[in-house]
Each structure stands twice: as structure tokens, then as C-alpha cells.
Image: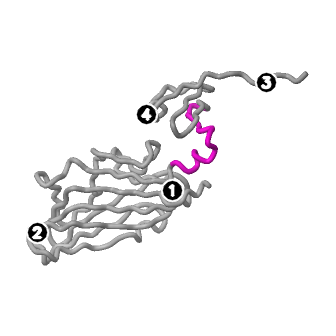
Amino acid sequence: MGKNTAYRVHVEDVEQSVVDNVNIENGAMLRTDSALYMGHNNENVIVYPQNLGATQNLGWARYDDTEYHSEYKLTLEQDSELVLPNNAGNVVRSHSSIEFYNSSTQKILGVNENDTYIITIAFKAEAANANQTFLEYNLEGSGQISRLAGTIAFPKGNHETHSENIMAQYYTDSTFVNDGIQLKVLSTGDDCKIWDVIYFIQRTQNAGL
């Protein structure tokens, strides 16, 4: 006669938002439309399907700044470098587990060492002295990330709105994962103004697979 080792466990059906915010108990199980979770070592671990935990962060997130807009523009003073601000006042994600930016530290984040990402930074800008003003930008952090840099001109003329779009592909090293990176901007020649900043970040390869 075989030994019965199966035990019936009550599994609660919940929304993903409950999983993300519940007080975690070891062994407690929750089920959403996409996965089965179990509390383990202070984390809700995906136990089914087994590959979802490794791939669910292979998605995108959009972070919109709501502080600086057409009625309240950020002035970049000449030769004064600063981090391009984004308070993430509006966030849209492909999955609730995704977090590629920290608005408190203004740092762009990585998940695993050797992951690859694509970032698009969109914003509007103008200059009072368009012929002499240039906007320098660079990603500041570890490794080769600082090579992702460029210069933006204002060819439309004085006080004309320019819609800018910066796109870069990069990979994450261990320091990136631990410390994050920042987008720095510098106005040269004269002051300029920036508003309607958006960070769109897509994780295209999960090195943990």
C-alpha cells in the first residue's frame, strides 16, 4: 500500500496588485490569471509556469515627468550640468513587476549583469539664442556607458519648440546593476529650456536565462 504524500492546500485567487503588495508569508500561495505564487524567503516566488519568473521582466516601462511642462519649463543655465529630471508622475508598464527607473535617485536601473536594453528619451526644448546654443547629453555611469553621448542644436530658430528624441542601446555590467546610471545634460553657448520629458526603457535580453 503506497503512502499518500499529497496534501490539499487552499490557494487564493487574487489580482496581480494584491501579489505585489501583500504581506508575504512563507508557504502561502496566491494565484493570478498568469501565474501561481508561493511565499519563500520574504519573496513571492513564481512556481508555475516555471519560465515566467525568468522572462516576465523582458518588457518595457514608460516614465513621464509631470513637473516640467509647457506652462512651467525647466531652465538649463549655461555651462551648468545637471541630471535630466523625471519625477515619474505617470508610469505605464508592460508588466507590474517591471522597474527600470527610480525617480527618487533619478537613476536608470538594470536587473542582471549583461542584460541588454534600449532607452528612448523624448522631450521638448527651446533656446532664446538658437544659433549659439547647443545641448550636450551623456549617460553617466560605469564601463562604456559614458560613450553614449551627443549634441543637439536648435535649427528652427529663437524660442521655437524642438521635439527631441534620443535613442541608445546598452548592456549592464555589475556596477550598473548595483548603482544605476543617470542622464546628464549641459547647455553650452547660452541657456535653454526643457519640458515634457519621457523615459521609455525596453529590456531586450535577459542574461539570466
Q: Which residues are magenta?
A: 41-56
| Sequence-first tag of 4 and 2 | 4
- The kind of residue on which mark 3 rests is Thr
Where does the image place residue 125, in percent across and percent down from the top left? 18, 64
Kindly identify which residue carries mark 4: 17
Q: Report helix, strand or loop for mark 2.
A: loop
Kindly identify which residue carries mark 3: 5
Q: CA distance from mark 1 to mark 4?
A: 31 Å
Where does the image place residue 144, in percent across and percent down from the top left? 47, 68
The image's mark for residue 160 is 2
| Sequence-first tag of 4 and 3 | 3
Which quadrant would residue 18 be assigned to in this image?
Answer: top left
Where does the image place residue 104, in percent across and percent down from the top left? 34, 44
Q: CA distance from mark 1 to mark 3?
A: 46 Å
- The kind of residue on which mark 4 rests is Ser
Q: Residues within 10 Å of mark 3 (few under 14, many from 20)?
A: few
Q: CA distance from mark 4 to mark 3?
A: 33 Å
Q: Is residue 163 above or below residue 108?
A: below
Q: Is residue 154 above or below residue 96?
A: below
Q: Is the N terminus in the top left, top right, bottom left or bottom right quadrant?
A: top right
Q: Is residue 15 above or below residue 167?
A: above
Tag in front: 3 or 2 = 3
